[in-house]
């Protein structure tokens, strides 16, 4: 409605690029469990996240960068770093957290004074590890991660530097905004494009700290949502426009979602409570049909009543658009072949080109 257009004026101009799902549901009404469910298809810690599964299924296009990167704008989702876990998959598929403000990664810049000594130690450790590995997954993953870390010391400073980006591009994303949170999220979105260009398979963005309550508007929804929307609106629109202008949108799937929605009725006068029974998200690019809506909630916006979906359906669709059959992507663990969607999930065919 009109309020949404006021909250997201830049994204409103791109409505014809989006597939909007209005009938998503979650199995959990609490933040941490719902975040685990959104990321891994299970409301408990310990399962591989969607990004880890994607990296496991697709491999890497850039040996100097991780396949799964999380850009931290200031607030990690409820549940913490386990949202980006590799779970029972090899540790090389875990999400790699990069800070968009300040030093992106601890020790990413080698100490020049001891650079030669560092290289000698790395080669010795590699030789010792190779001689004793014997196919042990934890050790093999440690070797791979240390070798990747060494290569990242060259790759990360380059990809995180925006010196080569034009002022027009930065303005498109909102770097010139007077709102510092918009600037932070603009940097996240531009860095996401740079990582995608360099072959990183899965990039996840966390929200900028526009409000300490995240989107959790229990007491003052209008103030909360207005501040958070202002931080994200122009950067997201800039990312979609930039990807499209560079011919990358068709091969890049963009997904925007929270772990659940908000109730249509008030909580405490000005707030809204959690609502797992029906909420919206949108997808763009990557073979998604633009300008369509799918499903609906009831007349009050409380429960999904038309074409209700589960997070498993979202995961199945995302994997499908990445060229992976969600029923075939499995990993043998604890005596059975486990998959991201478990025994659930159907591809949302109506939103696909």
Image: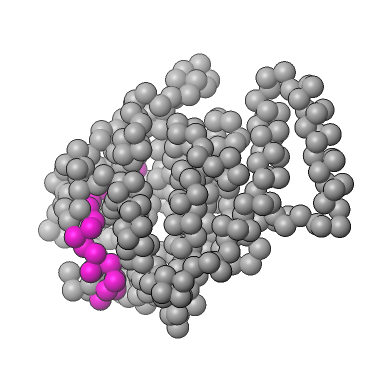
> Where 81 sits versus 317, above or below?
below
Q: Nearer the viewer, residue 338 or 176?
A: 176
Residue, x 16% and y 42% (percent of image)? 350
Q: Nearer the viewer, residue 152 or 291?
A: 152
Report the coloring of the rendering: one colour
> Where 295 sits versus 173, above or below?
above
Left of 318 or right of it: where is 206? right
> Where 303 sits versus 320, above or below?
below
Question: Residue 298, how many percent across, how many down?
Answer: 14, 54
Left of 336 or right of it: where is 22? left
Of the 4 image quadrants, the one containing the N terminus is bottom left
Residue, x 31% and y 35% (percent of image)? 320
Q: Is residue 104 magenta?
A: no
Question: Residue 297, how many percent across, how many down?
Answer: 17, 53
List the single residue furthest toward the bottom: 178
Question: Residue 311, how many percent across, how many down?
Answer: 33, 42
Residue, x 49% and y 68% (percent of image)? 165
Q: Is residue 214 visible?
A: yes
Left of 339 or right of it: where is 126? right
The answer to which quarter of the image holds residue 132 is: top right
The answer to which quarter of the image holds residue 54 is: top left
What is the magenta range?
A: 6-27
Residue, x 36% and y 57% (percent of image)? 246
Q: Is residue 316 visible?
A: no
Q: Is residue 7 magenta?
A: yes
Q: Nearer the viewer, residue 282 or 24?
A: 282
Number of numbered discs visible in the structure rendering: 0
> Where 190 sits versus 91, above or below?
below
Of the 4 image quadrants, the one containing the C terminus is top left
Question: Residue 337, how many percent across, how many down?
Answer: 44, 20
């Amino acid at each position: 409605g009109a309020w949404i257009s006021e909250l997201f004026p830049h994204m409103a101009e791109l409505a014809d690029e989006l597939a909007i799902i209005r009938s998503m549901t979650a199995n959990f009404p609490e933040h941490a469990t719902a975040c685990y469910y959104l990321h891994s298809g299970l409301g408990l810690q310990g399962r591989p996240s969607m990004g880890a599964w994607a990296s496991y299924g697709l491999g890497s296009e850039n040996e100097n960068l991780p396949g799964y990167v999380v850009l931290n704008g200031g607030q990690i989702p409820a549940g913490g770093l386990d949202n980006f876990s590799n779970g029972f998959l090899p540790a090389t598929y875990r999400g790699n957290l990069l800070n968009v403000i300040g030093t992106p990664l601890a020790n990413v810049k080698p100490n020049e004074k001891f650079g030669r000594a560092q290289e000698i130690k790395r080669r010795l450790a590699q030789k010792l590890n190779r001689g004793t590995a014997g196919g042990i997954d934890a050790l093999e993953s440690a070797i791979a991660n240390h070798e990747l870390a060494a290569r990242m010391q060259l790759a990360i400073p380059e990809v995180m530097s925006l010196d080569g980006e034009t002022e027009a591009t930065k303005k498109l994303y909102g770097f010139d905004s007077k709102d510092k949170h918009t600037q932070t999220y603009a940097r996240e979105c531009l860095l996401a494009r740079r990582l995608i260009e360099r072959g990183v398979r899965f990039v996840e963005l966390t929200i900028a700290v526009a409000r300490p309550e995240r989107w959790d508007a229990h007491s003052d929804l209008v103030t909360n949502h207005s501040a958070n929307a202002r931080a994200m609106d122009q950067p997201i629109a800039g990312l979609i426009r930039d990807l499209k202008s560079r011919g990358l949108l068709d091969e890049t799937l963009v997904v925007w979602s929270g772990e659940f929605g908000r109730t249509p009725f008030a909580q405490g006068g000005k707030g809204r409570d959690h609502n797992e029974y029906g909420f919206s998200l949108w997808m763009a690019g990557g073979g998604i049909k633009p300008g369509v809506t799918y499903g609906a909630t009831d007349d009050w916006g409380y429960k999904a009543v038309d074409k209700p979906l589960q997070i498993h359906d979202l995961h199945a669709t995302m994997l499908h658009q990445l060229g992976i059959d969600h029923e075939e992507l499995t990993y043998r663990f604890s005596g059975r072949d486990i998959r991201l969607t478990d025994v659930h999930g159907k591809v949302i065919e109506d939103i696909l080109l």
